[in-house]
Amino acid sequence: MIEISDSAINRIKDMIAGEETQGMFLRLGVNPGGCSGFSYSMGLDDQESENDVFMDVKGVKVVVGKESMRYLNGLEIDFQESGMSGGFTIHNPNAIASCGCGQSFRMRDEEGKPEVCD
């Protein structure tokens, strides 16, 4: 299960509404790499695969590749605005460590592919 706060859902809905392509949804995933070994991917998409897991979170279609589900079960996404900036934040209960940017994490039983931070 993936939890998305109301503020993040509202921001995602605004982003989808701003797209010209119909049928857009939020795609979440995990890739090897980043400072801590794994990095998150998050973006709008309109292409589905037979390896996708589909879910509805507060009226937003969320799609995760089956290979990423084990890393993202229990994931919490929020959106916070702060003055002139703002952004999505991710809390992953499966991660044992994350880098300062919050986009990279480490798992207990998997090393991933750690890279040098820029």
Image (spheres, rainbow, N blue to C red):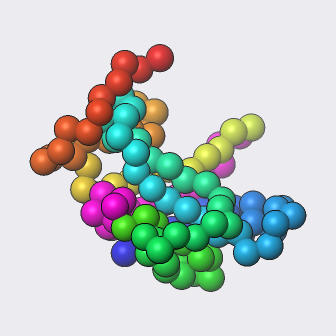
Question: Which of the image's four quarters has the N terminus?
Answer: bottom left
Q: For residue 19, which quarter of the picture?
A: bottom right
Indicate whether 14 appears above or below 97.
below
Residue at 49%, 80% (x, y): give it. 55
Residue that protrudes farthest toward the left in the picture: 109
Residue that protrudes farthest toward the right in the picture: 20
Indicate whether 94 appears above or below 106.
below
Q: Is residue 98 visible?
A: no
Q: For residue 22, which quarter of the picture?
A: bottom right
> How many numbered marks appear?
0
Residue at 45%, 56% (x, y): give it. 29
Indicate whether 85 appears above or below 65.
above
Residue 57 appears left or right of 109: right
Q: Position of residue 48 (x, y in %)?
A: 58, 70
Q: Position of residue 99 (x, y in %)?
A: 36, 33
Residue 110 appears left or right of 24: left
Q: Position of residue 74 (x, y in %)?
A: 33, 67
Which span of residues is magenta-colored? 67-83
Residue at 30%, 29% (x, y): give it. 114
Nearest the viewer among 18 and 64 is: 64
Q: Is residue 19 visible?
A: yes
Q: Position of residue 34 (x, y in %)?
A: 39, 32
Nearest the viewer among 31 and 26 is: 31
Residue at 52%, 70% (x, y): give it. 49
* Residue 106 part of the magenta segment: no
Residue 97 appears left or right of 88: left
